[in-house]
Amino acid sequence: IMTIGFLRPVGAAADVAELEYISALHQTDMPHLRMDGSIKDIDIVRFLSSRYGIKVTEEEVRKTVMHGLGGGDDDEVCIDLMELVAILLIPTLIKAANAVADQQSSADRGPDDDGSESENGVDSANALGSGLDGFDTEEGGGGGTAQSNVAEKGTENDLGSAKRQPVKPHPDLLRYVLQVILHDVTGSSEPRALTRQLLSDIFLSYGESELAEDNELLDSMVIAAGGEAGDESTLLDVNAFAHALTDDVRLYDINNEVRRTTNYFDVFKTHQSSHKI
């Protein structure tokens, strides 16, 4: 019997290659292209100048964009593929956090008059109890806050208002992710006290030994989740997790994904030039 062999991408190889392609499109340091797909300060300077006519220096980019997204502001800092993925996930994280807030509001108000279990119509226990299968639900199950944030008709930057709504993640996405993390680290998916040691253990479990020893970073993460450094009264539950993931990106408007606009409006917030000829 003759057999035929062939090569097949393993895991998310195709997705990684697509991210590398996106990064390569932003590279401008010819001919010294970086094969790791990283984006440097000079790439952002040239992109802003070419696309938007915004003139900034490399130092200004390092003090703002790189400091916030690349983890530092020295000459060697870049935006790597992991940080690129984090940027792409910002809208999803905000919408997932909105769903958590909606669930908490529903719990505080008590059961609805019609006896339904939640605004989202999803039994959280069943969804999580079945693992990833719990995410195989019909379209439309999502956070009420995200749903209420659809683009309003007639807003100033709508070019013929799009009649679509932002795509909503599963309402228990963050709860499930947190349970996986806690189970990997502690052996139990139950919420634990939000401490520097817990966060250090999480980093160590995923191979980030250098971050696990950065006490300043760990304390800032505790504070971002709503706790206080040295105080063990706050639990790392889904509400603290959602707060920590989105506390510094709340200014992002999730309606951008369905809003039809222009590069000109994104910069000047108007469709008409004020320049007098």
Image (cartoon, rainbow, N blue to C red):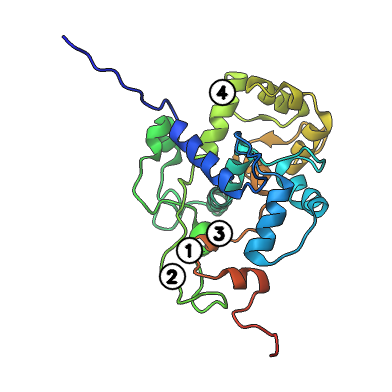
The answer to whether mark 2 and mark 1 are in CB contact below 8 A is: yes
Q: Quick one: quadrant of the N terminus?
A: top left
Looking at the image, which residue is at 63% across and 23% down?
206
| Inter-mark Cα distance, 2 to 1 | 6 Å
Q: In the rendered image, which residue does mark 4 sit on?
A: 183
Q: Locate residue 67 relative to residue 175 in the image: left or right.
A: right
Q: Residues within 10 Å of mark 2 (few under 14, many from 20)?
A: some
Numbered badge on residue 143:
none
Query: Residue 216: which quarter of the image?
Result: top right
Outermost residue on the left side: it is 1
Q: Residues within 10 Å of mark 3 (few under 14, many from 20)?
A: many
Q: Amino acid at mark 1?
A: Val
Q: Quick one: quadrant of the C terminus?
A: bottom right
| Inter-mark Cα distance, 2 to 4 | 42 Å
- Foreground mark, 1 or 3? 1
Give percent across and percent down for residue 237: 62, 36
Q: In the rendered image, which residue does mark 2 sit on?
A: 162
Numbered badge on residue 254:
3
Mark 1: secondary structure: loop
Looking at the image, which residue is at 73% across and 36% down?
234
Nearest to the observer: residue 75 or residue 192? 75
Q: Amino acid at mark 4?
A: His
Give percent across and percent down for residue 256: 54, 62
| Inter-mark Cα distance, 1 to 3 | 8 Å
Q: Amino acid at mark 3?
A: Ile
* Upstream in sequence: badge 2 or badge 1: 2
Numbered badge on residue 258:
1
